Image (spheres, grey):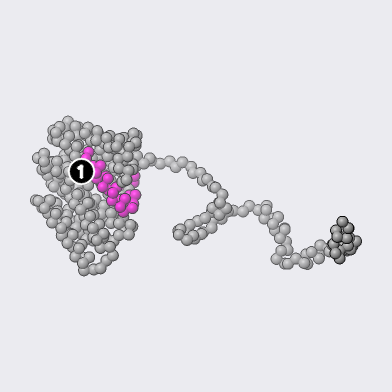
Amino acid sequence: MSTDNIDGEGIEGPEVDEGVEDFEDFLTDELDEFTRDDYLNATTEEYRGLAESMARSADEEVEMQAVAAHMPGLEAGVVGFDDVTGETHVETYEAQGGPSDTLVRAATGVVLVTLVLAMLAIGGGWLALLIGVFTLVSMVEFYSALRQAGYAPLALFGFLGAIGVLAAAWFSSQPLSAVSIVIGLTIVAVVFWYALLSRSRPLENASFTVFGVVWIAALLAFAMPIIKSEHSQQLILAIIAVTALFDAGSYFVGRALGRVSLAPGLSPHKTFEGLVGGVVVAFVAGFLLSVISWFEFDLTAGLWLAAAVSVFAPLGDLAESLVKRAVGVKDMGALLPGHGGLIDRLDSYLFTIPVGYVVFLWLGFL
């Protein structure tokens, strides 16, 4: 093979070496003549002193600032430096001293019971007035929760119906009939309103309006004939004591031993063990009612009341859990520390007061 083919056509070794030498001579001559002043003049004004500024900033302390950011689909919030960089930041908090949830719940319960006992000691009419206030506050909580869920109940009609139900139960000699009439009139008024005025989701809103009157006002109205009875103090205290002790037994036993969920679809924190504990405590309370002579209860009356409360108190609790799940709220309100709303504290009594009325009527106390 000849060497001409290796060098290629038109390219000779000596010519290439001469070009490289010329380029090296050019760089050497030019760089030698390129002074520092030439470099600064060739640089734009914006970059003069950049190196000095960067050197000074490296020695300065910089405080990280939060940046307000708006993201589609999210509410405006504050994004910190760590959020922007993606670094994991673990915040530490000092333990805050304060009462436990159990103590707060207990203190709230004591205040409510003391208020009821004070009104009962002053006179039956004051306790009836207190129950009326409890009823209206509970209905405010219920209708407010409905509005947060997107419904529009006729609150005015509900309040008027509730006042009418309580008044009928207090003033009428036939409270059940009078309460039924007022509920019927409330239904007619609500339906008539929606028939005259076009509103969105009329069936749902009308149903919730009437439901608030029946579920809260009508059930609490059963306390009125008990308050008017001859043995009002004993009967009211018996219902309060057995229901409160059932709730306390269910709560503490459920927290300590609860394993099997009673109604996971409605209230996952309610357990079978808690229910058993509440039933045992309720029957002990029923027995004590027969021992304390002031109540004038025999053993049969005490045990019947305990049995009724053991069945209907958890049903009242589960009924409220059903309503809250349907509405989409955790608590109906935040009026009572440790309990949520007032209706969250009265949920068991909404069922035990009517069944207590039936038991007392059957046993001849009314």
Tell me, yes or no, whether the highlighted magenta stretch contains residue 346: no
SS of the residue at dot 1? helix
Q: Which residues are magenta?
A: 310-338
Q: Is residue 256 visible?
A: yes
Q: Is residue 223 left or right of residue 319?
A: left
Tell me, yes or no, whether the highlighted magenta stretch contains residue 334: yes
Please tell me whether the stretch drawn in magenta is mainly helix, strand or loop.
Answer: helix
Query: Which residue is pictured at 18% across the width and 59% down the height?
Result: 187
Residue matched to label 1: 352
Query: Which residue is pictured at 33% across the width and 57% down the height?
Result: 149
Q: Position of residue 273 (x, y in %)?
A: 30, 35
If the image is split into quadrants, where does the C terminus sit? top left
- Between 209 and 272, the one lying in front of the other is 272
Query: Which residue is pictured at 26% across the width and 47% down the height?
Result: 319
Q: Position of residue 349 (x, y in %)?
A: 23, 45
Examine the image and state in which quarter residue 107 appears: top left
Q: Position of residue 197 (x, y in %)?
A: 23, 68
If the image is split into quadrants, where does the N terminus sit? bottom right
Residue occupying the far front of the picture:
1
- Between 309 and 245, the one lying in front of the other is 309
Q: Is residue 51 left or right of residue 321?
A: right
Q: Is residue 99 left or right of residue 87?
A: left
Q: Is residue 167 left or right of residue 20?
A: left
Height in image: 38 above or below 305? below
Q: Is residue 23 visible?
A: no
Query: Which residue is pictured at 47% across the width and 59% down the height?
Result: 76
Q: Amino acid at mark 1?
A: Thr
- The mark tally for this picture is 1
Callout 1 crowding tier (Cα within 10 Å): few <14, some 14–19, many ≥20 = many
Q: Position of residue 238 (x, y in %)?
A: 19, 39
